[in-house]
Image (cartoon, rainbow, N blue to C red):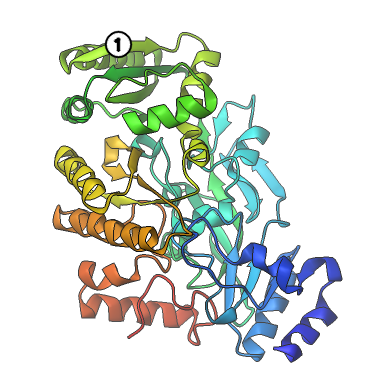
Amino acid sequence: MSELISRLQQSFRPDQLLIDPIERMIYEADGYLIARQIPSVVVFPESTGQVSELMQIATTHNVAVVPRGAGTSLAGGCLAIDEAVVVCLTRMQQILEIDLENRFAIVEAGVVNQQLNAALTGTGFHFAPDPSSAGASTIGGNVATNAGGPHTLKYGVTSNHVLGLEVVLPAGEVVTLGGNHSEQFDCDWPGLFVGSEGTFGLCTKATVRLTRAAPAVATRLAVFATLDDAVSTVSAIISAAIIPAALELMDQGMLRAVEQRYGHGLPTDAGAVLIIEVDGLSEVTEREITLIDRMCEQGKSVEIRKAETPEERISLWKCRKQAFGAIGSISTSFITQDGVVPRTRLPELLREVMRISAHYNIRILNVFHAGDGNIHPILLFDERNQQQVQAVLDASREILELCIDYGGTVTGEHGIGIEKLEFMTRMFNATDLEIFREIRSAFNPHLCTGRGKLIPSA
């Protein structure tokens, strides 16, 4: 390892390297704090050329490399297995081009999601993917895990908005996948790469699709006495062939946590609330929101709060976006799960989640993308208590197994990382997994990147 560090010191400035063990400890984990491993060194490249050089050095020394953005990954995707080198891409944060006429932008991997949308303010366009961590998460990280967010229901996940990628392969070769046009006459290489969690190589630039802002938006917060009433209303809305831009659910525990921390005036005696948003042409938006209001009333909603101004809309969304930040005031540690089930199975699954909570004596809060069945149970615990840690791991496993049993999957947007490797053999057969390994080998024959992530070892 000393030879590797010596070689890196020849190619990178001192301020681009973290070698001191105390400084490296900051990068021992991502948002999945149960698993930790201090990297052998942390490198901060500032250009594609430097990433390429770094990959060549790591390959020569047969050292694993782990790409990292803001570290908001929730499945251990940034964990430095085998004391890997962590490549932190946050200094590559330039917005290189915005082409409104052709509706695309070219950005470096370290550009924060919200940073791009701030640059688009006033243009009439936006970058549609909006993970809840959009104020911190990088577009490179969004690409790695195929991130979604509240508006996934209508606008789709990251892969639906990536036109092209610049990628550094493990041997240091720089390749371009796709381009800046919606109509590609080649294989969908960007579609293959998005969601690969660093197992193919490192994304250094992305060409992303820009979406025109809707002329009209209507936002509601519908209050329900019970969780079942809220979930049943979700099914009713979707069954009516209405696809809202967003359809989010927060249960009573989550409402109380957010209100305690931020004081938005949320109804803490409610069983659950739905945050509902529709957008589009004015006439269509008005018709759809009127129907949704009626379905909420028929679904036993006890109150409907309407956002009449842009400021009120922003305030309603703050309630949802600040949900995870509120947890810190009520628990020292938490894990956020990320399963998907058919919408019709949501009531059944949530009852099972509450049963699991009682069985393991673990408090679980719920905030999730109800419209597409993407649940996010938040399990609270004290990581200093090993019994609670084990209980959380066992409860998480049981919840994810139920997602599979109900015809769903174990991730909607957080990725597999290291946390969910064991479920890959349940979701895919041996032939499927071998095909996955062969595809990975075409990009990454020596497992220099993504080692121990996403695809289980043979």
| Rendered location of residue 160, percent (x, y) | 42, 48
In front of the other: 314 or 265: 265
| Rendered location of residue 146, percent (x, y) | 44, 54
Q: For the residue marked with disc 1, what is the amino acid?
A: Glu
| Rendered location of residue 133, percent (x, y) | 53, 43
Point 71% across, 49% down: residue: 96
Q: Quadrant of the N terminus?
A: bottom right
Q: Quadrant of the C terminus?
A: bottom left
Say left or right for 437 vs 94: left
| Residue 99, above or below 163 | above
Asked whether residue 306 is in view, the answer is yes
Asked whether residue 167 is in view, the answer is no
Say left or right for 48 vs 183: right
Residue behind mark 1: 303
Point 21% across, 24% down: residue: 226
CA neighbours of label 1 inside 10 A, class few (<14), some (14 to 19), many (20+): some
In front of the other: 195 or 210: 195
Label 1: which secondary element: strand
Point 31% across, 59% down: residue: 391
| Residue 103, above or below 111 | above
| Rendered location of residue 389, percent (x, y) | 39, 61
Q: How many marks?
A: 1
Say left or right for 344 vs 63: left
In front of the other: 232 or 356: 356
* Residue that lies at the very extreme toward the top in this rendered image: 308
In front of the other: 279 or 221: 221
Instruction: Name the image quarter holding residue 19.
Output: bottom right
Point 63% across, 50% down: residue: 106
